[in-house]
Image: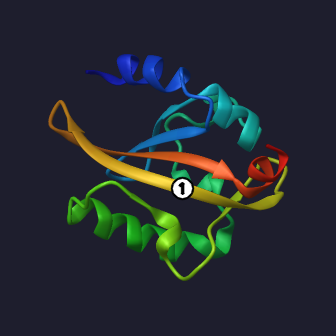
Amino acid sequence: MGIDQLDFLIEQLSDPVVAVDRQLIIVSYNKAAEACFQYTKDEVIGKHLNMLMPDNFHTNHNQLAEKYMKDNEPPRSMNNRKTLIYAKRKDGYEFLIKVAISNWHMSGQQYALAIINSFESIAKK
């Protein structure tokens, strides 16, 4: 499976989905993520994942993500940690999210996939 097939699959999901490579560069991003973060796919592909989170989370998140990828950890919910997880929209608005992550290897490269659900959207359901 290549990135084009991955894009097709994640477009079928109603939750926001973001896929990154080992360097946390965004390689796939679905329509639900566009609605959630207010960035278009063209604005995020090839950019660092940090653009979708508050500045004060960058260092800690990057260290945790590096360890997650290096240790090839199994899929899990990130919300089992003691700290809350925030995301940031294009307009700078910060909001709480729930995230499930998984990593996989494709064509000799390692990637991570995040399925996101904001607490605001949960409250609206």
| Position of the N terminus by quadrant | top left
Q: Residue at x 53, y 52 (%)?
A: 49
Q: Nearer the viewer, residue 46 or 38?
A: 38
Look at the numbered disc 1 and give the secondary structure of its residue. Answer: strand
Q: Using the rendered view, name the quadrant where residue 30 is placed.
A: top right
Q: Residue at x 30, y 70 (%)?
A: 67
Q: Residue at x 36, y 24 (%)?
A: 3
Residue 42 at what x, y percent from top left?
A: 62, 27
In this view, the residue farthest toward the front is 125
Q: Residue at x 61, y 38 (%)?
A: 16
Residue 77 at what x, y percent from top left?
A: 45, 60
Mark 1 neighbour density, 10 Å: few (under 14) some (14–19) many (20 or more): many
| Position of the C terminus by quadrant | top right
In this view, the residue farthest toward the left is 108
Residue 12 at what x, y percent from top left?
A: 53, 20
101 sits left or right of 82 in the view: left
- State whether residue 94 is above or below residue 48: below
98 sits left or right of 62 in the view: right
85 sits left or right of 65 in the view: right
**Residue placed under numbered mark 1 in the picture:** 99
Q: How many marks?
A: 1
Residue 114 at what x, y percent from top left?
A: 48, 47
Q: Using the rendered view, name the quadrant where residue 2 is placed.
A: top left
84 sits left or right of 102 in the view: right
- Please say which color scheme the image uses: rainbow
Q: Nearer the viewer, residue 78 or 94?
A: 78
- State whether residue 54 is above or below residue 118: below
- State whether residue 79 is above or below residue 47: below
In this view, the residue farthest toward the bottom is 82
Q: Amino acid at mark 1?
A: Val
Q: Nearer the viewer, residue 23 or 16?
A: 16
